[in-house]
Amino acid sequence: MKYEEWIDIWLENYVKTMTKLNTYEHYKYLLKAHVVPYIGRMELSEITAIDLQRYVSEQIQKGNKITGGGLSPNTVNTIISVLQGSFRTAQNAGQVEFDPSDKIKRPKKSETRVECFSLVEQKQIEQCVMTHKKIKMFGVLLCLYTGLRIGELLALEWSDVDLEKGLLSINKSSRDNKSSGGEKRIVGTPKSRASRRVIPLPKQIIPMLKEYKQRSSSVWVISDRGQPVSTRSYQRSFELLLKKAGVEHKGFHALRHTFATRAIECGVDAKTLSEILGHKNPTITLNVYVHSLPDHKKDMMNKIGEAL
C-alpha cells in the first residue's frame, strides 16, 4: 500500500471520527499539500527514518510553496506530529512492522520577536478606523482594546456580545481553509480550552459597539454587506488601513501584542492578562512579553530608585 492510500484510510477512519472537524481539515490540507507530493507514491512499508528526516529537512529549507523559503518551525512540527500519528496508527493496525517516524528530529523553535505598535502609531490607527467608510474596520479597534485573535474576531456574533453587562464571550474561532474546491471559511472551536473566555469590555468601547450594532445587518459582528469576512480578506483590509494611516506595516497579530503591551504598561498583573488573552497560564504570558518592554522596565526601576 502506498503512503497516499494509507493516509486516506487514516484520515477517514481515525482522524475524522475521533477529532474536531477543523483539526481533520487542517491535517488533510497539510498531508495533501506538503506530504503527498514528496512521499505519497512510496510504499508505506518501504519508507525509512532517513526518508522522513530528509523530507523534514527539505521542508525547513524550502517547503513554503509561496515564497520558496522554509516553513516555520511550528508548521514543520505540526507536519511531524501528523506523520507520527499516521505511522503510529499504521503500526498498530499491522500495516508496518516498525514506525520510522518516532526518531524524527524536530526543528527548534526560534524566539519570536514581539511586534507591537507604538502609542503614537496606535493613535494614528484609531483615528483612521474612526473615520473609515467601511464599518467592518471597527474590528481593528476592538482588537486593540481586547487582545482578540483575528480568528476570534471574525467568528464573533452579536449573540456573543452582552452590551448591558459589557462582556464578550469567546467560544469559537474562524479560519480560511484550502481545499480542492478552493478556499472556504471554517468556524470551529477556539485554539485551546483556555481560549474559551469572557472578556470585560472597556466602558469607552460599549457606546461605540451599540452604535455599530444598530448599523449592522448581520449576525456577525464583523461583516461585509451582511456576509462574514474571511481571514485573508480582513488581513488585506488591515494592510490598506495601515497604509492609509501612514503606519509601517506589521501583521494583524501585532494588534494583540499591542493590547498586551499597553496592559502591562498600565499595571495589569500577569494572571489577569493571561486570562484575558486566553493563555493557559501566566507563565506563557510572561515568556512572550517579558523581553518586549525595556522602556517600561526602566521606568519601574527608576520608581524603585525614588525610595533612595
Image: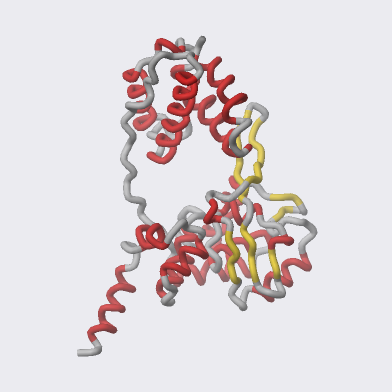
Of 201 and 270, the residue lying toward us:
270
- Residue 52 spot, x, y in % from top left: 37, 22
The x, y position of residue 283, in whole percent, is 38, 60
57 sits left or right of 184 in the view: left
Residue 34 position (above or below residue 137):
above
The residue that appears at 62% across and 78% down in the rendered structure is 203
Location of residue 270 by image quarter: bottom left
Is 287 left, or right, of 238 in this rendering? Answer: left
Relative depth, front residue between 8 and 235: 8
Residue furthest left in the image: 308
Q: Is residue 48 left or right of residue 268?
A: left
Q: Position of residue 250 (x, y in %)?
A: 46, 55
Q: Is residue 211 above or below residue 290?
A: below
Task: Identify the residue at image location x=43%, y=77%.
Answer: 266
In the depicted structure, whether residue 256 falls above or below residue 38:
below
Image coloring type: secondary structure
Q: Quadrant of the C terminus?
A: bottom left
Residue 138, by quadrant, is bottom right
184 and 18: which is toward the camera: 18
- Picture layout, residue 10 above or below residue 199: above
The count of marks equals 0
Where is residue 225 shown, x and y percent of the image?
76, 53
At 29% from the left and 84% from the top, the residue drawn is 303
User: Which residue corresponds to the image point at 57% horizontal and 30% vertical from the top-left?
Assistant: 15
